[in-house]
Image (cartoon, rainbow, N blue to C red):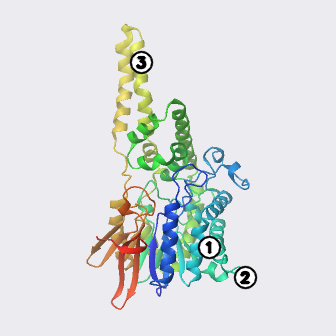
Amino acid sequence: MAAHNLLVVSDLHLGEDVGRSIRTTEGLEAALVAFLDHHQDHGGPWRLVINGDMLEMVGIVMLPDQAPRVPDDLHPHDHRYGLGGREDAAAIKMRAMVEHHSTVFAGLGRFVGAGHALSIVIGNHDIELCWPAVQRVFTEGVVEGWRHDHPSESGDAIAKAVTFHPWFLYVPGVAWIEHGHQYDPYCSFEHLLEPVIDEVEVDPNIGGLLLRYLGSQFGDEVHEVVHRGTFAYLKLWASRGPLHMSKIFVAYFDMCRRLLEHYRLLGPDQVTRHQAKVADRVEDVARAAGLDVGLLYRLSDLWRPPVANQLGRLLRALMCDRVALLVAAPTVLMATLLVPAASQTLAALVLVPPLGLLIAAAAIAREPTDPRRAMRSQAKTVRKLVGVPFVVMGHSHDPVHLVDDDGAYLNTGTWTPRGDPYKTFTHVTIRHTAEGPRASLRQWRDGASRAMSR
């Protein structure tokens, strides 16, 4: 692995327009294919690391009647919000993405076929890549892309050059590469290496369910408010008109029910059984990476526990107190005004104190939704624990290159064409030189990979 130079991208979110009437990704796709074709012939050999969220698997809205076949086992919500995170359903979504982005998979096939390697680090938006069936469909897509120009060859070598990494990619003495969502409590998983506690469906988290349940109702505009808090959602909700407002409220209610359904699974017996599976998985990952098991546990202690697994944090994250206040305040006011005048004082004494407690609860600050500070802080700790000069993350969509005395933290940013055009199509290269590994934050622009100033 160390013989390859590293070419790292993340947060492509391909497939979010499958089955939805939203902004297309044609420009992103064309840029990505040009990027792959350029690096196929320049600067290698490369290990292309797609560092999480290559695919928008949690946000895709594919209803069962839109699928080429209906999965055997569906959650009731799959009929309203699209196929969820069960293995068979996720494999069907993956096949749709391969077909929808066939030019990208053809580009990946050419890239790997030219002698380069492809490593997929799983992120929070494509967590369903944890399923073996989904990985098989992905790999088949790369092989199919390669076989377009090599129809008589088997493609076994292409398949072997594609690897999946549920947490990190570690290059000894060079880099530690992980997506970074484990430092974001709205997007983290309690057991990242085994994120299926009920053995049926990928564990839900707030970030994923917001996209699946509310994103399916709000459309592309949900991306504009996702980090702006309660009132931004309420403003967007109120702009939709009474009928659509009622549909969004139902989606919000269903999201809450899904999270509480998951919370009820977390009984002692189920957790104990699952922890045993996790322990086996940690040993497997440590052995494959050549790392000490104890080190992996110390690294996992840096993660932020998901809000979905603690009831109080969950209720605050779902804004249940603020939604209750939104309903309770006018109700208390009307009740106080409508009772006979002689009883209004008593009604106020009975109703106003609980309302005051609800106001106090609603005023409590939520946990920060911006993970950038936590990611930067923990990257430095990771670098010291693992003993590498570079830690590379994604997730935040914010390209970063922070250098200190003994190394650097780099963030690959995003390829989604939203927001600042100077902060898209960004990537990281780490090259082997006579003086040691050298890292650079870069942007694909005007047909070339250009260095970005720090």
For this rendering, which residue is in front, 405 or 270? 405
Q: Secondary structure at mark 3?
A: helix
Where residue 407 sits, quadrant-wise, is bottom left
Q: Name the residue carrying label 1.
A: 142
* Nearest the eye: 434 or 200: 434
Work out whether 159 lies above or below 362: below
Image location of residue 299, percent across then percent down: 42, 70
- Count neighbours of disc 1 (C-alpha within 10 A) and say few if under 14, some if 14 to 19, many if 20 or more: many
Question: Identity of the amino acid at label 2?
Answer: Ser
Between the residue at mark 1 and the residue at mark 2, the CA separation in whole angstroms equals 16 Å
Q: Please say if 187 is above or below 321.
A: below
Relative to the observer, which residue lies in front, 30 or 79?
Answer: 30
Q: Secondary structure at mark 1?
A: helix
Image x and y of residue 344, in percent: 37, 13
For marks 1 and 3, give the one nearer the viewer.
1
Question: Would you say residue 123 is visible in this rendering?
Answer: no
Residue 422's disc is: none
Give the residue at the far front of this rendering. Answer: 446
**SS at circle 2:** loop
Q: Quadrant of residue 181?
A: bottom left
Q: Is residue 378 above or below residue 251?
A: below
Q: Amino acid at mark 1?
A: Val
Q: Amino acid at mark 3?
A: Met
Label annotation for residue 152? 2
Q: Which residue is mark 3?
A: 334
Give the Cα distance between marks 2 and 3. Answer: 77 Å
